[in-house]
Image (cartoon, grey):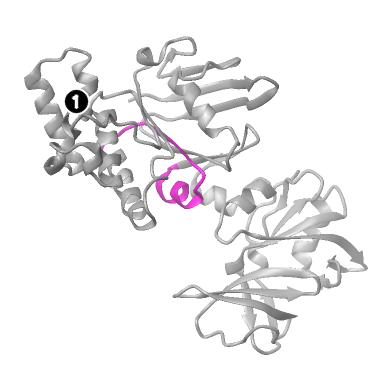
Amino acid sequence: MSKVMLNGLTKRFGKVEAVKNVTLEVKDGEFVALLGPSGCGKTTTLRCIAGLEKPDEGDIYIGEKMVTKLSPPDRNVSMVFQSYALYPHMTAFDNIAFPLWIRRRPRDEIREKVKKVAEILEISEFLNRKPGELSGGQCQRVALGRAIIRNPAVFLLDEPLANLDAKLRISTRAELKRLQKQLGATMIFVTHDQVEAMTMAERIAVMNNGVIEQFGSPDEIYQQPTNMFVSSFIGTPAMNLIECSLVENGRVISLVFSTNTLPVPDSIGRKLIENKKSKDVVFGIRPEDISIHEKSKPNSYKTKVYVVEPLGNEKLVTVEMGNTYLKVRTGLDFKLEMSENSWIDFDWNKVYFFDKNTGKTIIYGLSKSTNKI
């Protein structure tokens, strides 16, 4: 297997710049996700690595070799498409064996390699079936088998689980992660599903408008987002983000919302005053870091229940705080209904503040290091 390096990769389609000066290094044997909304440039980046698109600027390296101008067959990569791209008139055996057939490998060698790959993917009993006789999950494994049998330097996967139902996606995620470790393979996969990226990838490149907003481990992306886009894209439900102004009145530092004023702990306030570039900031907190109560408590803020959504093992409550709406995760013992008064308090160790103008993170909260903008 080999590492993959992108250096200043840029791809345009007419006047549209789909990928903008992307620099990225994927380590040998690493499982990396390109994550982002539709149209962010993630699939175009993958297709440039595969050689299916020619970049307008920048270089692509696989291992120590620059492959920017090489044709797809000369790059030693295998790509698994969202649609599987299996030959419908061929059996699963022949679909898997096809890369070896066209290289005119001996029949005994082909038979032995297909057998080994089928055992790894647990599809030995389906080898005589055609794609129309297979389930979506089985077709996905056949497509993976066709990629594996070539023993490529890099595996490229374009939304490989998108066509599977919800239950099958969960099991296939685990299978694909296990397979990657078993093969020691360098894998780059594209997804718009943050759960897929968080559960499968060792590192995630969060893309938006053709650029990489942040590249790091799932924990880093979740706990230390570099800007508002990353903080709002990662997490289900999304982080609560509220525009507000920072006001200092003597020793008291407060956040002024549209209809509310909230004093903040002195340590948070001092960090904000030291690092802000403007009094206008965005306050962020995740739903699981808000506590909700049926009665008033010290340092709690009065709210009103807007809607309650039962989720089986928990409840998701939306509350009104003036003109502001906040999502709160809570337990099944929460009994308040719509329009009833409630009280919330924040875990100030886990709050975030962003610059309103640039969107960049100012601070991560009391328990996290300051990130100056």
Q: Residues within 10 Å of mark 1 (few under 14, many from 20)?
A: many
On-image quarter of the N terminus: top left
Tell me if residue 112 is in the magenta stretch.
Answer: no
The relative height of residue 303 versus residue 93 in the rendered view (above or below) is below
Residue occupying image coordinates x 76% and y 74%: 321
Q: Nearer the viewer, residue 169 or 67?
A: 169
Image quadrant where residue 368 sits: bottom right
> How many numbered badges does the structure rendering display?
1
Q: Nearer the viewer, residue 99 or 76?
A: 99
Image quadrant where residue 10 sits: top right
Residue occupying image coordinates x 58% and y 26%: 23
Can residue 145 be seen by looking at this rendering? Answer: yes
Residue occupying image coordinates x 33% and y 53%: 168
On-image quarter of the C terminus: top right
- Part of the protein shown in magenta: 181-202
Tell me if residue 184 is in the magenta stretch.
Answer: yes
Image quadrant where residue 268 sits: bottom right
Q: Nearer the viewer, residue 200 or 220?
A: 200
The relative height of residue 135 versus residue 67 in the rendered view (above or below) is below
Residue 262 appears at what percent x and percent y? 81, 72
Left or right: 244 as drawn, with respect to 74: right
Disc 1 secondary structure class: helix
Q: Which residue is mark 1?
A: 97
Residue 205 appears at what percent x and percent y? 54, 38
Residue 85 appears at what percent x and percent y? 34, 31
The relative height of residue 291 versus residue 160 in the rendered view (above or below) is below
Amino acid on which disc 1 is placed: Ala
Q: Residue furthest top?
A: 69
Residue 230 appears at what percent x and percent y? 62, 47
Can residue 300 be seen by looking at this rendering? Answer: no
